[in-house]
Image: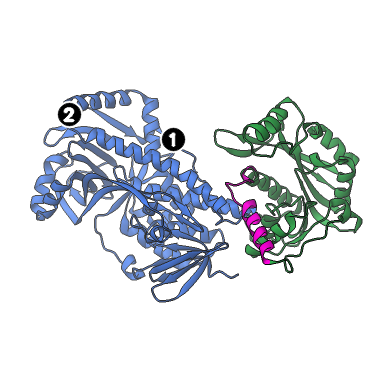
């Protein structure tokens, strides 16, 4: 935590213009982050249903997540933080990349949303004693050096009976073909080197890691891309490439 | 950042209210703007205009609480008979018969007069607390990052998250957004009126494909049918200029005598048949539905049915987006509506165009091909069921309100 946090209020106007352009890029459905936008409805469907189920909320009502404190780790431009705020949750968006924070802030302001974006890490937040009802940990664990230490910090961040949602990539020949060769080389959806296939985690390994970190895994589903409909969907059985888990911190 | 309403709908005809009601019922605040005073829209007398509502459209009306208000005025269509014929000759030997007994969903459609549907919509909107109706005209609109501001003729401005244009084939909403249209003329005009007849129609709809254009005879309650009679522009203009008695003289040989003596009931209408499709169904903070998106040839009563499909798809897309916490009027979300509807629209536009071109022809060879084709389709129950389900609007990916 050495980089100073850029403050939007005090940076000069050329900087603001740069951040505005970056925010526009993050949120452009046809731009650089297109693969994330393509996947986002599917991720949001899973997240919202899990939260609604765990905390007994009705998604057809306005602000169904009111009163819930939620942490979005690796928030990026705010693709998950903004929807969660709209649904009524009090959101902290954390990103280890300092550059994402002012970008996310600018977009939230344009959208009329109040979100507490911070340049920090899960470990630092846990150390500071922060507590949440929900921790979103989407496509982060495959990038960290010590997954067990990281997941332990996630558990510490949760209140008892709190919900932890964690998605990542499976490790098998198919995921190598799809996530590395397909996404990075063929489709060029992601910059080459985005993912290190050796750090991918199988669903059984993740369940084991979650348990070792003191969490109780309760659900796992696949995110499957259909190249014909060009859409992602949630699958009960196909966890072969992208998948997501829900776990609970025991009371 | 405040909004006067979540969604602002321009056009209070049929698709506008059909969209306003389910959105309001789901908790969105909706403003509906129409220049025509509500009274004029509500107190229409019988004028002969009627809709062939597909089963999927009836389902939508049922879901939004409208069907129970109009069901007593509706005529179920139990059968559709399509045949190839030439004026004065009666139907050709092969003809295609669609029977609702072949699909399990009940009658394949319902005939309903325009005035009952309009009245039911207006009454339901009046009772809905989330709907505000304004009698005014939009003169300008400007989208920004979080919404769109609309200026009215009265000088008033309204800010909303999403603007929906339901303002017909010459949609001002589309024009102001710079959306261009692609269109073509079928070279035909549809003559529309209601006909009283001696014998009961037994809920059977007929479509005669004749060289100048198709004649559809659609059953209304009692011994009355609505007709859609297509002729070349020149023929139609000449026929339309005739007094009622002579108009009927021209119609009689085309109509045939299978329903006994026929007479004119109500007003006569003439609509030039032109297809006009908006080059985009969406723009920043804006969506087009119904004729504003695609003005279609009403060869099988598909205009309103297609509009209601837009309604159901748009409600699905924005309600799901809201439940996920997405900005429901963002480009990301509206693109899903456009993708969903453009595909269906193009298929339908191409299909109605091709059907019409194939049948509006007196080439003897084509006529033979048609007759054989119809006999073949009639002989294959599987293919016939496919046609039937298509006509009932039950194919393609169905939105929630139509399932």
Q: Nearer the viewer, residue B368 or B177?
A: B177
Report the side of B319 relative to A144 (left or right): left
Residue A120 lies, in percent from the top left, at: 83, 55
Query: Is A34 part of what is drawn in magenta?
Result: yes
Q: Which residues are magenta?
A: A13-35
Report the side of B15 relative to B334 (left or right): left
Classify the position of the N terminus of chain A by image quarter: bottom right
Residue at 69% across / 52% down in the picture?
A80
Residue B6 lies, in percent from the top left, at: 54, 64
Q: Are marks 1 and 2 in contact (CB under 8 Å)?
A: no
Query: Is B219 part of what is drawn in magenta?
Result: no
Considering the whole magenta stretch, tell me its main secondary structure: helix
Q: Chain of mark 1?
A: B
Chain B display color:
blue
Q: Nearer the viewer, residue A162 or A12?
A: A12
Q: Circle 1 sits in a helix, a strand or a loop, which is it?
A: loop
Chain A display color:
green
Badge count: 2
Can you identify the residue that label 2 sits on? B363
Q: Nearer the viewer, residue B167 or B25?
A: B167
Q: CA distance from mark 1 to mark 2?
A: 38 Å
Residue at 52% across / 69% down in the picture?
B159
Q: Chain of mark 2?
A: B
Residue A220 lies, in percent from the top left, at: 75, 38
In the rendered view, tell whether residue A33 sits above or below residue B10.
above
Residue at 25% across / 32% down in the picture?
B358
Residue at 70% across / 64% down in the picture?
A114
Mark 1 vs mark 2: which is more N-terminal? 1
Residue B104, numbered circle: 1
In the rendered view, tell whether residue A131 sits above or below residue A181.
below
């Amino acid at each position: 935590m050495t980089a100073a946090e850029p403050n939007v209020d005090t940076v000069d106007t050329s900087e603001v213009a740069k951040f505005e352009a970056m925010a526009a890029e993050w949120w452009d459905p046809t731009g650089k982050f297109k693969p994330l936008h393509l996947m986002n409805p599917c991720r949001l469907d899973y997240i919202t249903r899990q939260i609604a189920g765990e905390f007994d909320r009705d998604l057809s009502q306005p602000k169904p997540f009111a009163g819930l404190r939620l942490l979005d780790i690796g928030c990026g431009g705010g693709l998950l933080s903004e929807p969660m705020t709209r649904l009524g949750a009090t959101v902290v968006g954390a990103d280890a990349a300092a550059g994402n924070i002012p970008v996310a802030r600018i977009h939230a302001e344009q959208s009329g949303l109040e979100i507490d974006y911070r340049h920090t890490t899960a470990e630092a937040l846990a150390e500071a004693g922060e507590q949440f009802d929900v921790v979103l940990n989407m496509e982060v664990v495959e990038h960290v050096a010590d997954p067990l230490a990281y997941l332990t910090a996630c558990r510490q961040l949760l209140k008892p009976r709190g919900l932890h949602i964690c998605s990542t990539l499976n490790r098998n020949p198919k995921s190598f073909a799809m996530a590395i060769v397909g996404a990075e080389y063929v489709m060029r959806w992601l910059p080459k080197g985005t993912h290190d296939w050796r750090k991918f985690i199988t669903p059984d390994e993740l369940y084991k890691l979650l348990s070792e970190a003191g969490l109780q895994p309760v659900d796992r589903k696949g995110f499957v891309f259909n190249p014909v409909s060009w859409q992602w969907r949630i699958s009960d059985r196909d966890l072969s490439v992208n998948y997501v888990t829900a776990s609970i911190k025991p009371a | 950042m405040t909004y006067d309403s979540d969604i602002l709908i321009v056009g209070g005809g049929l698709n506008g209210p059909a969209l306003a009601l389910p959105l309001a019922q789901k908790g969105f605040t909706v403003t509906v703007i129409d220049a025509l005073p509500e009274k004029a829209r509500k107190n229409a007398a019988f004028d002969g205009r009627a809709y062939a509502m597909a089963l999927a459209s009836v389902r939508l009306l049922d879901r939004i609480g409208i069907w129970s208000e109009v069901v007593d005025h509706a005529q179920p269509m139990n059968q559709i008979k399509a045949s190839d014929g030439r004026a004065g000759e009666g139907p050709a030997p092969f003809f295609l018969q669609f029977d609702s007994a072949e699909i399990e969903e009940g009658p394949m459609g319902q005939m309903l007069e325009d005035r009952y549907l309009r009245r039911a919509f207006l009454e339901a909107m009046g009772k809905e607390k989330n709907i505000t109706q304004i009698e005014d005209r939009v003169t300008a609109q400007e989208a920004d990052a979080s919404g769109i501001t609309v200026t009215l003729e009265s000088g008033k401005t309204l800010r909303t998250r999403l603007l929906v244009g339901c303002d017909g084939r010459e949609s001002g909403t589309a024009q102001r957004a710079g959306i261009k249209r692609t269109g073509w003329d079928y070279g035909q005009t549809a003559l529309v009126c209601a006909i009283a007849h001696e014998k009961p129609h037994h809920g059977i709809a007929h479509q005669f494909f004749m060289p100048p254009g198709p004649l559809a005879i659609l059953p209304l309650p009692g011994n009355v049918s609505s007709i859609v009679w297509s002729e070349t522009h020149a023929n139609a203009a000449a026929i339309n200029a005739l007094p009622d008695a002579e108009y009927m003289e021209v119609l009689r040989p085309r109509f045939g005598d299978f329903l006994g003596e026929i007479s004119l009931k109500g007003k006569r209408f003439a609509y030039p048949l032109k297809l006009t499709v908006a080059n985009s169904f969406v723009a920043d903070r804006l969506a087009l539905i119904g004729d504003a998106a695609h003005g279609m040839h009403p060869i099988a009563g598909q205009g309103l049915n297609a509009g209601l499909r837009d309604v159901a798809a748009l409600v699905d897309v924005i309600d799901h987006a809201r439940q996920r916490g997405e900005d429901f009027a963002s480009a990301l979300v509206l693109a899903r509506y456009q993708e969903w509807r453009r595909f269906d629209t193009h298929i339908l536009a191409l299909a109605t165009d091709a059907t019409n071109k194939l049948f509006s022809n007196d080439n003897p060879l084509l006529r033979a091909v048609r007759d054989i084709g119809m006999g073949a389709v009639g002989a294959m129950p599987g293919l016939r069921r496919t046609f039937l389900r298509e006509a009932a609007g039950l194919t393609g990916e169905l939105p929630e309100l139509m399932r």
